[in-house]
Amino acid sequence: MSDLCDSTGAGKLKFVLNYKIKSYNHLQLIVCLICATAQELEKFKFVLDYKIKELKKQIEPREAEIIEMKDQIKEVRVCTCVRVHVWECVLCVSASVCRVHACVHALPIVYNGSR
């Protein structure tokens, strides 16, 4: 107790008290800056969320168009496969006809004895 009562003890106590008050004020300033930064970030987040919603609104119709175009591509592929198959059949038949025609021409001509 004697330290606090003498002049040097009171000076130390006053110094410590002033230091703690300055530290407290500094921390209050930091808290205020953090709160202001948080508010700015909230505003920025709100703007970005709005932009994201607007972009999604633009994307949705395009996604529908993409799905429709994919369906059209599938239909075209099916039609193309059918056409290729038909042409393969036509070529196969025409090749068979050519072979039959060649066989017919290769046969010896047999005349019937009746005139």
Image (cartoon, rainbow, N blue to C red):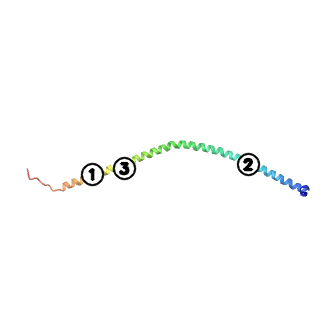
> CB atoms at circles 3 and 1 under 8 Å apart?
no
Q: Residue at x 45, y 45 (%)?
A: 69
Left or right, residue 101 beside residue 21: left
Whole-percent x, y for residue 101 in the image: 21, 53
In front here: 6 or 70? Answer: 6
Compute the Cα span from label 3 to label 1: 18 Å
Kind of residue indicated by mark 1:
Val
How far across and down, in percent of the image, does residue 113 sit? 8, 53
Residue farthest to the front, as pictured: 1
Q: CA distance from mark 2 to mark 3?
A: 70 Å
Residue 15 image offset from top left, x and y in percent: 85, 54
Q: Which residue is mark 1?
A: 93
Left or right of 49: which side holds 114?
A: left
Q: Say how many tags the image has.
A: 3
Residue shown at the point (30%, 51%) measured from the top left:
89
Amino acid type of the residue tagged 2 in the rendering: Val
Q: Is residue 115 left or right of residue 106?
A: left
The residue indicated by pointer 2 is 31
Residue type marked 3: Cys
